[in-house]
Amino acid sequence: MNRQLRLLAFIAIIASFSTWFPSRLNAASTNEARVTQVKNHVQLADSKNPRRASVNEIVQEETIVRTGNESRAELGFSDETVVRLAAHTAFDFNHGTRGLNLKEGAVLVQAPKEATGATIHAGRVAASVAGTTVMIEYHPGFYKFLVLEGTARSYRPGHLGDSVLVRAGQMVFGNSEAALSDPVDVDIDRFMTTSRFITDFPPLRSQKSIVAESEKQQREKTTKTLVDTNLVIFGGGTQVSVTDQEHTDTADHKTAALVTPHRAPSLNRNTAPALP
């Protein structure tokens, strides 16, 4: 390869990285975010100038980001934290990533190890994340909080002791007005192959870590430490359904399709509630 071709290849690699890792092209201020991905109708609603969002636009504190039907968005912060918004989601922030506020809908948050961490509030539930990738969904009356890699803490502010560590491949869910549930195990691989947080966006920077956690689950299935069930949560909500493999593979997954396996030694603790 001659010098000119090497230069072109180098430029192509740089362009590829700016597409695969848009959070590197993020806001200069710790109290700002930059729009890095937009699909369909995404609105930035502040008191002065509600407008349609565009890529590379700076988002200030307390500006509400809203996504419409079949719409998606991604925001990048200066510490390389990434927030992805599902359809029908309203989200804002203050004090940078220390005050991420999910008003309704679902978001995926990837907070790198180098960052100071992020705090997510969703109704009366909150989560502290650092060096981890999580999904949280909230609507009045219910929430879901799933960890794909790393460890995060879910808690209810103002309720001393109502706190739980959630590890990779685990989820807590239920009524946001009630005490937190024990974590249940979820199938990371199924999430990664069906969730639009993954399929509608470029790969996350934490993709390698998530794949490693998924492979760990596969090894646990081989040794029967982790056993597949036919319990599923389709799209929005927390309703657990019993289904066969065919329907699981062909269903319409709006935000996250979560198969809940269980650990053989503790079936009663880790299977989804209200089911035998």
Image (tube, grey):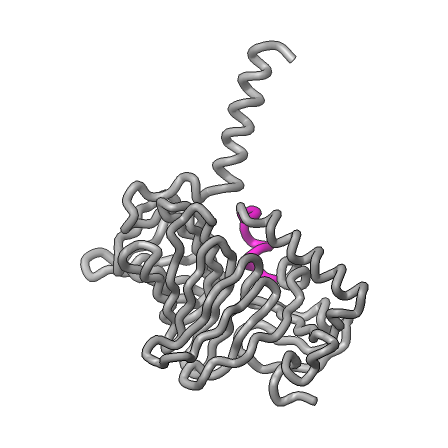
Magenta highlight range: 195-204
The answer to whether 212 is drawn above or below residue 143 in the figure is above
Q: How many marks?
A: 0
Question: Left or right of 155: which side holds 256?
Answer: right
Q: Residue drawn 67% across and 85% down?
A: 268
Q: Residue drawn 64% across and 62% down?
A: 188
Residue that protrudes farthest toward the left in the picture: 48
The answer to whether 180 is drawn above or below residue 132 in the figure is below
Residue that protrudes farthest toward the top in the picture: 2
Nearest the eye: 19 or 87: 19
Measured as percent of width and height from the top left, residue 106 is found at 46, 67
Examine the image and state in which quarter residue 170 appears.
Answer: bottom right
Question: Left or right of 226: which side holds 10?
Answer: left
Measured as percent of width and height from the top left, residue 181 is found at 52, 81
The answer to whether 118 is drawn above or below residue 3 in the figure is below
Question: Left or right of 227: which side holds 235?
Answer: left
Nearest the eye: 245 or 144: 144
Q: Is any part of residue 11 visible from this angle?
A: yes
Nearest the eye: 250 or 265: 265
Q: Residue drawn 61% across and 86% down?
A: 273
Q: Is any part of residue 69 visible from this angle?
A: no
Please identify the dominant SS of the magenta region: loop
Residue 142 among magenta residues? no
Measured as percent of width and height from the top left, residue 122 is found at 39, 72
Measured as percent of width and height from the top left, residue 118 is found at 39, 58
Quadrant showing the N terminus: top right
